[in-house]
Amino acid sequence: MQPVGSTRTHGRSLAYPFETPPQGEELIEVAPGIHWFRLTLPFQLNHVNLYLVADDAGYVLIDTGLGNRRTLETWRTLLAGALKPYPISRIVVTHFHPDHVGAVGFLAKELQVPVYMPTTEYLMAQITDLNPGAMEQPHHRAFYREHGLSQETVDNVVTKGHEYLRLVSGLPHTYRRLIAGDTLQIGARRFEVLTGGGHSPEQAMLLSREDGIFLAADQVLAQITPNVSVHATDPTGDPLGIYIRSLRELQKTVPAGALVVPGHQLPFRGLSERVEELIAHHHVRCGEMAAAARKGPCSTADFITAVFKRPLDPHQIGFAFAEILAHVNFMLRAGQLVEDGRKDGVVRYVSPRSP
């Protein structure tokens, strides 16, 4: 799910074959047998892209939208109307974020079709579904407090598991595993299964090399940066480093000129150029944080105010915190920051002195 505080980046070097997205119940054919439609989201990023890919026995649905009441009502309307000529035979869920997996429980039961997901993504959704209160445990609260968040913000952040449940309709009891390096045959098309970390642990992407079509999910978006966050369960993890490595692999793997079909915003051509923009954006952010740390010790919470110039509410701060900590951990590994002790129980960082 895209955070409220996501940064918009240029995307000026890209080519957009479709100037406007589908409206209402409209479907747009982005390539022969691949149809694009949208569902609304109640967030600043107000939509998610879904796709139907022609299969032998109907169509494979790529992602599902939210599982809240409004979206499920929309699904009932679509299945009885605009999507009736497109019978869904299988569902592919790219990752566990609720705007992509939310309606899968409802749809799998309603349509009686198999669901394909990477194992890590299925388990992440399952864990949150089974134990929504885990984030409220003392060690989670201590994690946020030691990085300088206020008690008000911590109280907001640790209830996110309950919010997740309100946006997800459950999971099917069984699924079919997507594994990087495998092939998924959909109708006449042979899709290579790619996976990438950073935005989520094992996000699935599909590449039709022969047709030059890359179903990118949220790993590469045209004008905003996907959320890359550190969480309390892996407090010293390096999702940003993992994300950048994934982007470099995509540059090597996806053919030049391929049509990038993303989970949000418009399809585009120019993947390699977009990867360079995304990586440059993260390095600029690291530079801003390094400059702040040269002025004096900074906690992760301090870095938020150095990077985000506008006021953020507690909900937005929670997202911003997780993204900033991803940059902190990346910079620690690169030697761009060093820890400067834990005064008052809050860890702070400084830029290392030049030799």
Image (cartoon, rainbow, N blue to C red):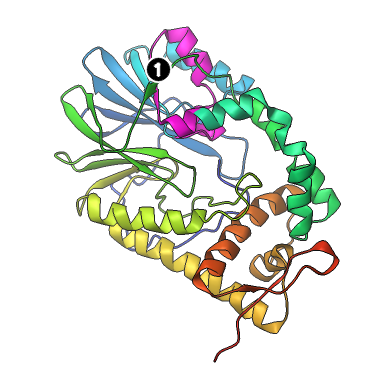
Residue 118: in magenta span: yes
Residue 295 x, y percent position in the rendering: 70, 83
Tell me the SS state at disc 1: loop
Q: What residue sits 29% from the left and 59% below the top?
A: 272
Q: Position of residue 36 (x, y in %)?
A: 35, 32
* Quadrant of the drawing holding the N terminus: top right
Image quarter of residue 279: bottom left
Instruction: Determine whether, in the image, residue 90 is placed left or right of residue 209.
Output: right
Location of residue 176 in the rendering, given as x and y in whole percent from the top left corner: 37, 21
Name the side, left or right, on which 90 lies relative to 288.
left
Q: Position of residue 130 (x, y in %)?
A: 64, 23
Residue 15 visible from this viewpoint? no
Near-viewer residue (139 or 244)? 139
**In the image, is residue 9 part of the stretch drawn in magenta?**
no
Nearest the viewer among 213 and 349 is 349
Q: Residue at x 74, y 59 (%)?
A: 147
- Dot 1 crowding, Cα within 10 Å, few <14, some 14–19, many 20+: few
Which amino acid does the dot numbered 1 rest on? Ala
Give the residues in magenta: 95-122
Placement of 259 over or under 109, stated as above or below = below
Picture residue at 70% right of the left edge, 37% below the top: 160
Residue holding disc 1: 82
| Relative vertical location of residue 221 with respect to residue 137 in this rendering, above or below | below
Quarter of the figure with residue 195: top left
Q: Is residue 200 visible?
A: yes
